[in-house]
Image (cartoon, coloured by chain):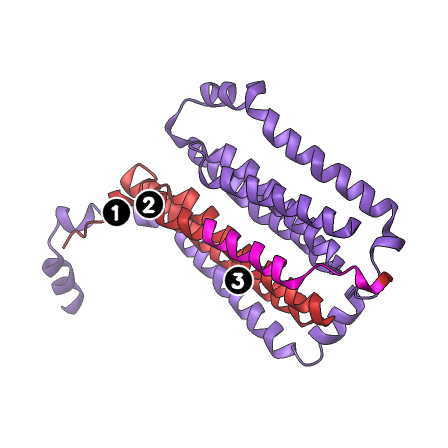
Amino acid sequence: MNEAIVIPMEHGLLLAGILFLIGLLGVLVRRNIILILMSLEIMLNACGLAFIVAGAHWGVADGQIMFMLILSIAAAEVSVGLGLLLQAHRRFGSLDVDQASRMQG
Amino acid sequence: MLELGLFYIAATVSLISTVLAVTRYNAAHALIYLIISLLASAIIFYLVGAPFAAVLEVVIYAGAIMVLFVFVIMLLNLGQSGDVAEHVLLRPRMWIIPSLLCVILFVEIVYVLQSSESLLNGMVVGPKEVGLELFGPYVLAVEIASMLLLAGLVGAYHLGRRYFTDVRDVPTAQPLAAVSGDDHE
């Protein structure tokens, strides 16, 4: 009776997919660099959610380890991305990515 | 069935707050909704039997990485004067929906923690198993992750310097050929 109460893996993966799509739409639609970085975080978090749900379905620890690796990737990505954001703000005076769409060559 | 209901409540909160985070105009408001989304994800992690990942989600994602965003938003100030932004941010109407979502999550986590022995059964993968796997077969991945974090540190340090502010003016002030000619002679 007790072990029957298990969250269906399909619903968890569906939630992860929807979150990933929301993040992807955010990256494609928004033009503010901060919002684009936040959408990237949403996408990485959705990947981690998929790993956790799949790992919990089989009762193994590999999903959590993959989540920790995604966490370190997210930390490195957001530090470099925010450094680039500061440079863009210094150089172009705004956070609009369309300001940086032209080369100077 | 109760655990399923809790899962769907947390999933709904996560979806609502993520959609609101992507569609906000103000970056600070988007950040609030994004933090709520991450907290909802942490509750989902706890419900599916990954308590260590839930703790990491709260501490590192919602704690450390979001603090970086807060620092940058505060540093740039986003073009408005500070007190106007604060006035808009502290308007009570802006806090109704985040507070409502937070209260839902809080009630849920209190309920889960009070009845944890009946809700979480069998499939819990605790920190001990994760640690044994992490420093056993996956130790190479840990090393690669440390290299990645070091690269991120060096990249953030390099990009964060004020050195690049003069780069745009240097080529227009003096031609590049003269500079390189001086170097070669």
**Callout 1: 10 Å neighbours few (<14), some, many (20+)?**
few
Q: Return the residue at label 1.
A: A100
Q: In purple, which chain?
A: B
Q: Nearer the viewer, mark 1 or mark 2?
A: 1
Element marked by disc 2: helix
Q: Position of residue B178 (x, y in %)?
A: 10, 58
Q: Is residue A88 visible?
A: yes
Q: Position of residue B61 (x, y in %)?
A: 61, 50
Q: Nearer the N terminus, badge 1 or badge 3?
A: 3
Splitting the image into 4 quarters, where does residue B180 fall?
A: bottom left
The label on residue A73 is 3
Return the residue nearer the eye: A25 or B90.
A25
In the rendering, what colour is chain A?
A: red
Name the image quarter holding the N terminus of chain A: bottom right
The residue lying furthest to the bottom in this view is B137
Element marked by disc 1: helix
Q: What is the magenta segment's predominant secondary structure? A: helix
The mark total stands at 3
Splitting the image into 4 quarters, where does residue B158 fall?
A: bottom left
Residues at marks 1 and 2, CA–CA distance in whole angstroms: 8 Å
Residue at image point 25% right, 42% down: A99
**Callout 3: 10 Å neighbours few (<14), some, many (20+)?**
some
Q: Nearer the N terminus, badge 1 or badge 2?
A: 2
**Residues at badges 1 and 2 in contact (C-beta under 8 Å)?**
yes
